[in-house]
Image (cartoon, rainbow, N blue to C red):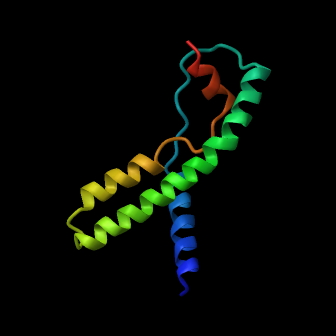
Amino acid sequence: MTPYRLVSFILIATLASGCAMHTPPAPMDARPVGTDDKVGAVAANLWYVPSRVVLCGVGASISAVVMTVTLGQGYDSASEIMHGGCSGPWVLHSSDIRQAVP
């Protein structure tokens, strides 16, 4: 297996596992979502989604290095690195934009 295929496989597996564990946030209030929130969510996703992919990929790589170097004894540290980069919502919705405004 070439290094590029291996890296691609790791990234795809990481993204798939992150999407499988995602749960949407609970709504904070019942204010209606406006058009400006929808436009804001689309604009924010242009930067947010690729950044999350890079962050999760780098976190997965660092976690793999930690697990390899410590021969599996650094599981807690590797898990925290993966959780920090790959957990949480991967796509912002208009309701997420509305909730951010007090």
Q: Where is residue 66 in the image (x, y as percent from the top left)?
A: 30, 65
Q: Which of the image's four quarters has the N terminus?
A: bottom right
Q: In this view, does 36 lie to the left or right of 45?
A: right
Residue 20 at least partly seen = no
What residue is at 52 percent from the left and 46 percent from the top? 22
Q: Position of residue 41 (x, y in %)?
A: 69, 32
Q: Position of residue 15 (x, y in %)?
A: 55, 58
Snapshot quadrant of residue 39: top right
Q: Which of the image's four quarters has the C terminus?
A: top right
Snapshot quadrant of residue 75: bottom left
Q: Where is residue 72 in the image (x, y as percent from the top left)?
A: 24, 69
Snapshot quadrant of residue 78: bottom left
What residue is at 22 percent from the left and 69 percent from the top? 70
Total numbered labels placed on residues in the image: 0
Residue 90 at least partly seen = yes
Q: Is residue 82 left or right of residue 54?
A: left
What residue is at 26 percent from the left and 72 percent from the top? 69
Identify whether 15 is placed above or below 101.
below
Q: Is residue 77 left or right of residue 42?
A: left
